[in-house]
Amino acid sequence: MLCCMLLLGAASLVVSCRPSRSLDVRELATDVYIQVARQDLVLPLIAMADHASSGYSFSLDRKGDAANAARLREERLARMRDPNNPLALDQVSITVRRYGASDFNSEFPKLCPLLTRQWARAACEGQDDATPAALPGNRFTLVDLGQLAHQDNWGGHTCLKGSQRKPLPRGAGKAVILCPAMVFGGDTDEFHTALVRVRADLGAVWTVWRSDAGEPVEAMATREGKAITLFVETAIGKHENYTRLRREMCGLRRPVSGDSMPPARRSQ
């Protein structure tokens, strides 16, 4: 009897770890209007790595969790839909990938035509191989550099405990290796947290690593910092310039090798 109860309890927990709500592609394609470091940004919800997540429920009250998560998501999305009153955020993590490809949701291919920006549609459909190949392979996090001293985690990017941070770059588009990255299972010199000043106090933080392609981490940080700066300027500002984005991203693509994407990371 006890064995059966344990099995049933385990089954309930396994079920409750499933996504609490199926994703609505129309919602994910919605343009959101936000500010980071007083800089206006426009991008589809699907590109916001954390906000686009459906979330997972570890509670036995799955229906209650799903309803509460849906309410909070609608409230948050409503606050980001107003172009005249962008929502101010301390940081936002961004991914650029083939949004329309999903092994778990057959509705995702319908997402691409709903996206309003050309860069997002091209990435969604896999028509633009330059932009994803130039930007960091996982995610990058836009941050307010004025708040950097008060934070120690930027979208999952952290410094190794006890390590010293390098001074922030002063010029726009300038990137530095900020510190060794906190990554469990990695060598102390394998992963590093990079930072670029995009413009004014708007910066970006992401992770660079020792690549088998022969690209030094400093060169990777410089190249990807330029790509992030270009992306912010031409893709997610108030006005899109896709022609310039495509033209200049081609020269910023990462070297081709078997290690063209980040190694599997057990923690960020």
Image (spheres, rainbow, N blue to C red):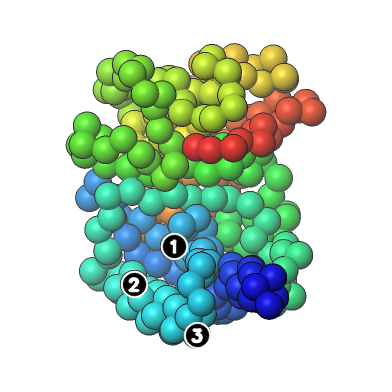
Is 189 displayed left or right of 180 in the figure?
Answer: right
Q: Are marks 1 and 3 in contact (CB under 8 Å)?
A: no
Q: Earlier in the sequence, mark 1 or mark 2?
A: 1
Q: Which residue is mark 3?
A: 63
**N-terminal-most mark, 1 or 3:** 1
Residue 126 point in image, percent of width and height = 73, 55
Viewer-side residue, 147 vs 59? 59
Is residue 157 among what the camera can see?
Answer: yes
x 28%, y 55%: residue: 89
Nearest the eye: 118 or 59: 59
Q: Residue furthest front?
A: 1
Residue 211 in picture, x, y percent from top left: 66, 21
Asked if the residue at tag 2 contacts the one at tag 1, i.e. Cβ–Cβ closer than 8 Å, the answer is: yes
Q: Amino acid at mark 2?
A: Arg
Place of residue 251 in the rendered image (x, y in percent of width and height, measured from the top left): 63, 30
Q: Which residue is mark 1?
A: 51
Mark 1 is on which residue type?
A: His
> Measuring 50% from the left and 37% from the top, which residue is drawn there?
268
Where is residue 106 drawn, in percent x and y?
A: 74, 75
Tell me the distance, in whole angstroms, between the alpha carbons under discs 3 and 2: 20 Å
